[in-house]
Amino acid sequence: MMETLISVERAQEILASHPFKWATEEIGLEHAPGRILARDILARCDDPPFDNSSIDGWAVQLSDLPESRIEIGTIFAGDQPITKPLNPTEIYRIMTGAPIPLGADALVMVEDGIHGLPRQDYIRRKGENISLGEVALSTGDLVTSSSCALAATIGHKSLPVRSKLRIAIIPTGDELTELGKPLEPGRIYDSNSIALSALIRKAGAEPIIIKPVLDNEESLHKTLDYCAEEVDLILTSGGVSMGEKDFIRSSLIERNAAIFWKVLMRPGGPPIFGHWNGTPIFGLPGNPVSSQTVFHLLIVPWISHPDIFHRRVIVKMEEGLRGASDRLCLRRIQITSSETGLVGRPLTHQGSGNVRSMVLNDALTLIPPNTNIEPGEHVDALWLIS
């Protein structure tokens, strides 16, 4: 049975209960950032793989008296470990990254001179960062440049990642005009396809943009039938509210294929989720801001990793913000840093058709239902990463 007027949390829960059948591919580390790990990554060696020096200086024995030290050689990074034990009073000149000679248990910094105070914590111990066989990266992790560096450090040259989802974008509406064509009276350009395509690519998926579909059930069903055979997910924009030509909503409900419709959020209240011929379909609102907002709140955690798109922060508001009586309110604000923390203020009006507001502002508030924010009060927000 279709659920309606549900919370954002409930919508996220439902989507999470409909996971994709992710294929796995192995890709080189240089191409892996931004992808999602498909399985755990185990260390193929210790890090460090041997005891080594963190400084330039001398390798010594703590038991030796400083004035008795005799330098017998120099060890460089890349040299084979010295396995002949040090005799009392013998020391080695040692460079950063060089292996610790057998018998040495402390290092003296070159800046302190040969008779300086030895310290054991200048030695990087074998496996102190990670040990052979230990889980270094976990299934579902977002691959970053740092995690690629870690993978290389522990012996991997590639990583198993989720294959890219193929996602169809179907804009709907008689009013839409393709980019590059003259704009006739009463028409608007299709901007949602461009925004959604960019967001999908950022999510690590492959967007497939379909030409705008007129408000005609036969044409819409034909397009949906085709896409259901070709892609992993269908995203539509428009046609989900209460209008006479909102055929996405009516078609899914008439087929008993809708799982939920309407989410308690503003903007973006009327999205619909279901299946079309076995393929998941998510109907986004037609208003551009609503479409992008729903994508951030619901689609991102379902198909990707939120860390790619935003950080959750607490912001002190310079101006008051009006919330919504019964739903989560996502006002667009700009965040700046101050000596006392993050400060937010809205730079534009909050109309859901105001695409420019998503350019001039860089965050979405998370104002709880039945709440207004007074000047100087703090509010949670999603700080969007461009």
Image (cartoon, grey):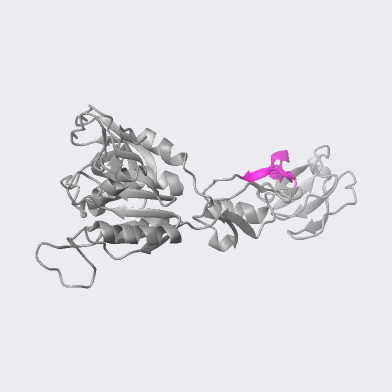
Residue 301 located left or right of residue 325: right
Instruction: Return the residue nearer the eye: 39 or 280.
Output: 280
Residue 67 located left or right of residue 250: right
Residue 378 located left or right of residue 136: left
Occupied quadrant, residue 200: bottom left
Q: Is residue 114 above or below residue 318?
A: below
Counting from the top left corner in percent of width and height, residue 44 is at 72, 51
| Residue 350 in sight here | yes
Q: Residue furthest bottom?
A: 181
Q: Is the magenta stretch mostly helix, strand or loop?
A: loop
Is residue 301 shown in magenta? no
Residue 246 located left or right of residue 309: left
Instruction: Return the residue nearer the eye: 46 or 137.
Output: 137
Please give the name of the residue rendered at 38% of the width and 54% of the height, measured from the top-left corner.
234
Instruction: Return the residue nearer the eye: 268 or 261.
Output: 261
Q: In which quarter of the image is the N terminus?
A: top left
Counting from the top left corner in percent of width and height, residue 195 is at 31, 58
| Residue 119 in sight here | no
Q: Is residue 116 above or below residue 223?
A: above
Is residue 127 shown in magenta? yes
Residue extent of the magenta highlight: 114-137
Q: In which quarter of the image is the C terminus?
A: bottom left
Counting from the top left corner in percent of width and height, residue 356 is at 20, 55
